[in-house]
Amino acid sequence: MVARALWALLAALRAGWCLLPQSGYLHPDEFFQAPEVMAGDILNLQVYYPWEFLSSSPCRTVVFPLMTSGITYWLIKSLQQLDICSSCINSYTLLVSPRLLFTIFSFILDYSVYRLASFWGADPWKALVLLAGSYVTLVFYTRTFTNTLEGLLFALLMVLVSSKKPSGSSAEPTSSSLIGVITTAGFFNRPTFLAFALMPLLYWASLIVDSQKSIKTLINHFLKFILCACFTAFVFITADTFYFTSISLDNLYSTNKSSLFDVIVQLHDKMVVTPFNFLSYNLNPHNLALHGTHPRVTHFTVNGVMLFGILHILAIGAGFKMLKKYVHQLMLVRWCYRGPPGLLYSEGSPTLLLFYFVPLAFLSLFSHQEPRFLIPLILPLVLLSASPNRAVKWKLLIVLFNLLGALLFGCLHQGGLIPCLFHLEQLIHSPASSSHPRHYTLLFAHTYMPPRSLLNIKQTDMHVEIIDMAGAGEETLCQTVEQRASNSTCSDCHIFIVIPGTVRATITKCGVSFKNETLIFPHLSMEDPPQIPVLSSGNWRSQLGLYILELNRDHQTL
């Protein structure tokens, strides 16, 4: 009963924290791989389209963005058009509505853990508490990442390949069609899904081969899988082709009264297969270097620990013990008639360890390694860790680790940028601004890329200019600020500079003054971290804050 109550409390925390909302900004991809694109397409807001969604280089399928952020934005747009909610579209709903849908979807993980626990010899409620209490679930699985969808599809795939007969033995999987659909959908969402799907698919295939006496039934299973996979691929390719090539059926048929065959030929010529473009780009070491290169062992030694803490370390220990055991057994039975125990036929820790480490090994082959790439592995890890007498003595360490992770990534990390955009949206759309139009220049320096959609500016509105200076140096930053300050052609221009407190001193060297400043707390920039001696002084709040500085154009220079 205690475990059930604790899970319910953590589940309520997950939903409530999403609505609060979380202020931490994990990575630009949480905005620029779905919400930002859909806000431009559906709500006609000013946005920044990432290169992956440009027709010249389509590397991301549009199907999942449409099914997630697209649906939520269409819903709030419809509510506003029907006058059910006069101001449904604002920075809060633009941020929270897609996150809320992902938070609802995140309970697929909980369902999967509950279904899988008995099959893999784990305690269901112990596993659920480990899952719900992990900051990975609380933070990453409530954000609009493609990695989040990858984790949910991986969970569903594990459920489909894991089934038991009433007697308790493994049953023959009967969901070949669904397995084909999910595998293909996961591949189009992120081609790296194949790394996660490999072991479940091999496990599924081994169960089918082992349980079938008839070659006809065996072929029937694989035929269903292939046909459904091909149909799913056709749906994704068709949707992406229409989206990225901006063609419509009316245009195709109206061109010289084309026949159906001509239409198919035209579609084939314009066909867009986003996973192949994704792989072509990411298999090029030069392209990966543009996004950052890491040692091949980063996932094993850093990212796994950063996400899962002691559970990852215990899994590594269990993996070495398993390897040592099976190598020893292999050497003992090498000369015997019977072979060594098959890992794929085991219904416990050995197979779960493979489900965890095989994807980890494949992802480690790439030089670009980010922690979020590993979040789907939380499912086999909690099942492994919830087996009897495992990880009990580490309870306090697990709780402290996840509290720290939730605080760091859910609140502190780039935590001032989203509240800053909320503040600027209210300022831009204030009654004073509406009655007397003003021009705003918003300059962001040393922050993550700001999602323009949260400012709620229509594409037809030209009174707001957004400049993202990223990590520009002092000279470049000062030159840009001075140019905007000395612009005499705009009489009613308001210039705001958004910059972390750790580099605020840079602006004071630019020879400009400010008539207003707002400090948003907390904000932790790992690219410009605060210095420990400064934090111990009375200036710690400034170091852990984000400044919104309004330029004083009446006194341009000091």
Image: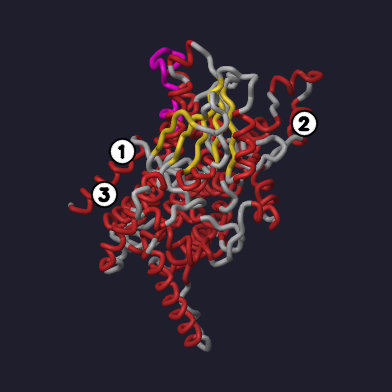
Specify whether 259 is left or right of 92: right
Does the residue at mark 2 contact the one at mark 1 (Cβ under 8 Å)?
no
Crowd rating for badge 2 (residues with CA inside 10 Å; few <14, some 14–19, many 20+): few
In the image, residue 82 lies in the stretch drawn in magenta: yes
Q: Nearest the camera: 468 or 60?
A: 468
Measuring from the top left, give residue 125's x and y in whole percent.
Answer: 27, 54
Q: Is residue 103 above or below residue 300?
A: above
Q: Nearest the camera: 436 or 534?
A: 534
| First in residue order: circle 2 vs circle 3 | 3
Q: Amino acid at mark 1?
A: Gly
Disc number lying in front (2 or 3): 3
Describe the element under mark 1 as helix, strand or loop: helix
Specify whether 523 is left or right of 199: left
In whole angstroms, how far apart are the C-alphas of marks 2 and 1?
49 Å
Q: Nearest the camera: 217 or 279?
A: 279
Specify whether 291 is left or right of 398: right
Q: Nearest the camera: 432 or 188?
A: 432
At x 31%, y 65%, the residue is 387
Q: Is residue 272 above or below residue 153?
A: above
Read off the residue under disc 3. Answer: 7
Disc number lying in front (3 or 1): 1
In whole angstroms, how far apart are the C-alphas of marks 3 and 1?
14 Å
Q: Amino acid at mark 2?
A: Gln
Q: Amino acid at mark 3?
A: Trp
Crowd rating for badge 1 (residues with CA inside 10 Å; few <14, some 14–19, many 20+): some
Residue numbers of the magenta segment: 80-95
| First in residue order: circle 3 vs circle 1 | 3
Measuring from the top left, give residue 39's x and y in whole percent.
Answer: 53, 28
Read off the residue under disc 1. Answer: 16
Read off the residue under disc 2. Answer: 266
Q: Is residue 268 visible?
A: yes
